[in-house]
Image (tube, rainbow, N blue to C red):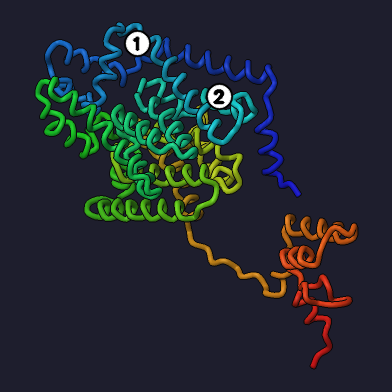
Amino acid sequence: MKTALDEATTALRSRAPWPARIVVFVLLVQELYRISMTYPSLDNVLVVDAARKLAHGFSPYESVRFLYPPSSLPFALALTPFTDHQLIRLFPWALAGLLLLGWWMALRMFEVPFFSWLGVLGIGVFSIFNPAVSVVELGNWAAAVVPLMSLALLLMSRERWLAAGLVIGLSIAIKPMLVPIGLIFLLARRWGGFAVAAGTPLAIAAAVLPFLPQPGLFFTKTVPFLLHGQDGFARPYDSSLLAILPRIGIDGPVVTVIRGLVLLLTVAVAVLLWRRGGDQRLRLVHTSTALMVGTFLVSTPTFGYYPMVLVPVLVASFVVPGSITRSVWYWIASIPQVLGVHFYRIDFLGPVPASPEQAYKPVVWIGVVGLLLLIKAWPRRATPASPYEIPRQRSADASGDFAQAVRRQRDGRGDDVTMATALTASGLDPTAEGPDRGRGEHDQQDARPDQ
């Protein structure tokens, strides 16, 4: 009998009507127009300005706000021909296209049509989901990681591990958010894919460094700056443990211990989820999500739009039984991320400025997703079946073989060997005679008088 979730899955897989498609795209277009007319794509402008310094013979790492690895410079240089005005007006549309591409590939991974109800609702949510809107408003390159994450998991699910390694490597070269995904290659024992994922950004960086003025600045200035969680400009928006715990009175060595324990727990949960097996697509999504949410908590900084890297594949996995997105708690944890939903002392009537308190919102989502995955990974003791019930369990194939053998015997086209084979496959006793023929061993024992 179908459950309510099964019926919901069937409905979400069905094709959405044209009016629904038009409505969600109208909402998306007007939101993108608002962003392109009112926001300067600040993060991207800083990256492009640093790349322009390189074109004039200066090191991009002289800029305190250029925090990308050397391997990202070829991609940044590709944007320098555009004027600032063109980038401000056009870049949000490009980032939205990347987000939609990631959503399409996530749906493709689970064989859901892009214009299904699930696909159309996802497009509509992009207009009101804070991580999606924030990454576009800021013009942050994390939007480029979203389709690369979806594509990598899609390729892994189809056993194309070398191609997946190349995709992960390119993602790390652009913005090193998906470094933890390398553990999946090790868990799957795909050494070639891991080598490609690790070698791609290193090869690009090695090709760039000889042409970079003062390449040592990246290691002496940028890396220490990142390891300390940046500065006061970015720290109010940081949702990592290093930033959140001191706000609630936990500081000093205790923070380091907690971060270490969370890191160990993250690796343990990822290993347990991988060893559970099951649907390979869900296995990949759950394991990669565990690695990423643990990294979001341990590393610093972690900004509010970081969950966007995981949301497409997580939501698309709803159609598979066992997905954590089938838990009502996942959707409750997502409510604070909806634009227009305000909370007391976080969004209003709280400290001024309110931004340090707003960093708690992503922590709720990250924490709940982590707990759901911990529960999913927790070893469960299997309940043994009663020995008297085992012979009664007949598969559909075995029952079909038995019925076919009976028909052949009745028509004179069968033999005793065929009948005995069919009885054995059905869990019955082929040696019994008379009324006991075709009854299981335990059925016969139950029929004998007590001795």
Residue 251's place in the image compared with 57, above or below, is below
Residue at 15% across, 29% down: 218
Q: Nearer the viewer, residue 71 or 226?
A: 71
Residue contact between numbered discs 1 and 2, judged by CB atoms under 8 Å: no
Q: Quadrant of residue 77?
A: top left
Task: Tell me, for residue 87, which label it has, or none.
Answer: 1
Residue 135 in sight from this viewpoint:
yes
Residue 349 in sight from this viewpoint:
no
Residue 338: percent from left, percent from top: 51, 31
Residue 132: percent from left, percent from top: 45, 27
Amino acid under disc 1: Leu
Residue at 39% across, 9% down: 89
Question: Tag 2, which secondary structure?
Answer: helix
Pointer 2 residue: 123
Amino acid under disc 2: Ile
In the picture, measured across the screen, residue 408 lies left or right of residue 266, that is: right
Residue at 41% across, 21% down: 136
Residue 106: percent from left, percent from top: 51, 32
Closer to the N terminus: mark 1 or mark 2? 1
Q: Nearer the viewer, residue 245 or 407?
A: 407
Q: Quadrant of residue 409?
A: bottom right
Give the quarter of the figure containing the C terminus. Answer: bottom right
Q: State how many labels appear.
A: 2
Residue 316's place in the image compared with 37, above or below, is below
Question: Tag 1, which secondary structure?
Answer: helix
Q: Within 10 angstroms of label 1, few (less than 14), some, or many (20 or more) residues?
A: many
Residue 303's place in the image compared with 297, above or below, is above
